[in-house]
Amino acid sequence: MIHALFLLAALVLPGVATAQTWTPTRPIEVIVPFTAGSLADRNIRTAAPLLTRELGVPVVVQNLPGATGYNRIYRAAPDGATLGVGDPVAQMGLALVQPQPFDILRLTWLGHWSAGTQTMVLSARSRFQSLDQMRGAAQPVRCGTFGGVSTGAMQCALLGRALGFQVAFVTLAGPPELVLANVRGDVDVASLGPSLWTDHIAQNSVRPILSWDATRDDRLPDVPALGDLGLQRFAPVTVLRSVAAPPNLPAAIRDRLIAALNKVVASPEWDAFVTQSRLERNWVFAADYPASLEAAKVLLEENAAALRAAF
């Protein structure tokens, strides 16, 4: 029996070792379903040369905004040659409003660069100057969005339901265009990462009114958070700057990619990028990461009727 066990180990263990040492043999393409210049785009373009160093093959970034990009990731072969970045929360919300040709939760989500604390701002040119003025407003609040149903747009819809105002959505091409529209007064309110608003807050062209998190953002300590309004239950509906692979990615490839991504966020180059950009340091890349998406999924499904009505 002992002899048989040794023979079995000799047959099995080499295969295990091979699986654990998966190495890419051709360039890796990373699909960005957002426009160039967005934070998701900046994240992966900063990480690409660091991933190239860790994986030993070129990592090439391609922008394919919208459903086209997500569908490209979804339909790709699960061989490690195609990755993507995206916001699973936004896509879960979009699927509630408009059927999609893919199931976003079937993607192999590897983790995120950051779970962004969004800053909701009012344009200095808006007819509303505070959250209190928005409560029960007779006129719709113009909320900027991009790509159809963005996470910021869902936040507007949820806040409108809680505070009793209607929302009229204005669709822009991407985050840079949304910032410009808010500064010009083409929209009343918009929600994006605080780093995109820093200069405009300093110039008083926008007014921060809410940090979309249960507690206040250390970068904007005077701005109220959801917890201050008793709305902390909405906190999971936030931007996740996540990394995904196609469905059914083998565990060996998944684990090798996760290891490389963890090396990237531990590098001095990534630290310098995060420090300069004043980004969150709450990255996580792990095999059990998909389980963390369940809270947002449940919350969105509970508010599905309100979201459909708003959009």
Image (tube, grey):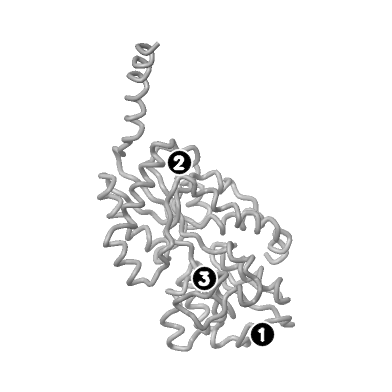
Dot 2 crowding, Cα within 10 Å, few <14, some 14–19, many 20+ = some
Quadrant location, the N terminus:
top left
Which residue bears the numbered disc 1? 132
Dot 1 crowding, Cα within 10 Å, few <14, some 14–19, many 20+ = few
Residue 182 in picture, x, y percent from top left: 52, 79
| Above or below, 42 relative to 6 | below
Secondary structure at badge 1 equals helix
Q: Which amino acid lies under the numbered mark 3 shown in the image of this protein?
A: Gln
Give the alpha-carbon distance from disc 1 to disc 2, as whole Å. 48 Å
Residue 276 in picture, x, y percent from top left: 32, 72
Give the alpha-carbon distance from disc 3 to disc 1, as whole Å. 19 Å
Any mark on residue 118, and which? 3
Q: Residue at x 73, y 60 (%)?
A: 305
| Above or below, 160 relative to 36 | below
Quarter of the image for residue 23 reads: top left
Any mark on residue 218, and which? none
| Above or below, 58 relative to 276 | above
Quadrant location, the C terminus:
bottom right
Secondary structure at badge 2 equals loop
Q: Residue at x 48, y 86 (%)?
A: 205
Q: Nearer the viewer, mark 3 or mark 2?
A: 3
Mark closer to the chain start, 3 or 2 = 2
Quarter of the image for residue 287 reads: top left
Secondary structure at badge 3 equals strand
Which residue bears the numbered disc 2? 76
Q: Is 197 left or right of 27, judged from the image as shown?
A: right
